[in-house]
Image: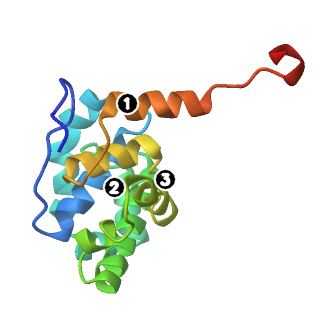
Amino acid sequence: MPRREPGAPPQVNPQRLGDYLEAMSKSVFQTGISWDVVDKKWPGIRGAFAGFDAKRVAAFGEPEVTALASDTRVIRNRRKIEAIVGNAQRMLDLEAEHGGFREYLRSHGDFEATVKDLRKQFKFLGETGCYIFLYVVQEPVPEYHEWRASRDAMQRPRAPRAARG
């Protein structure tokens, strides 16, 4: 396991599906928001989302989503709230299909394939969110600075052919 960099989120040893849901939900809420804001609100978010009991969250309907969207304990982004409910439903499906959520995560063979499938299966998880989620739940991830550099290199715009000489 890579050593923890300063500022890296703390890791957890998931014992139940809700531990995975909580880690993933934190990545969802952190998208586009200061991590400090999310950390300060986290105890309230945990309470509002039934302690991240996956079955309970998956059963949230329109009334619960509407209530959460106006609950001052949470980050009131309706799309993220809906994503977390949908992600809980998908986690339950994948857990049943693979005999456990950890088994699902480890069914892909490598980090890149896992990230690709996570992005396909779950909402509001980009590459960085997937990296953080996998790191937090102690799944194998590449060293962060090397991974980030490889991502930045892939995203650099190329010069037009004529300019390349």
For badge 1, the amino acid type reads Glu
Q: Nearer the viewer, mark 1 or mark 2?
A: 1
For badge 3, the amino acid type reads Arg
Q: Position of residue 10 (x, y in %)?
A: 14, 39
Q: Nearer the viewer, mark 3 or mark 1?
A: 1
Residue 74 badge:
none
Residue 79 badge:
3
Q: Is residue 17 left or right of residue 28?
A: left
Q: Position of residue 135 (x, y in %)?
A: 25, 46
Q: Nearer the viewer, mark 2 or mark 3?
A: 3
Q: Is residue 151 left or right of residue 8?
A: right
User: How far apart are labels 1 and 2 at the CA level?
Assistant: 38 Å
Residue 146 badge:
1
User: How far apart are labels 2 and 3 at the CA level?
Assistant: 11 Å
For badge 2, the amino acid type reads Leu
Q: Which residue is mark 2?
A: 68
Q: Label 3: few (<14), some or many (≥20) within 10 Å? A: few
Q: Is residue 60 visible?
A: no
Q: Residue at x 73, y 25 (%)?
A: 158
Q: Is residue 18 left or right of residue 91?
A: left
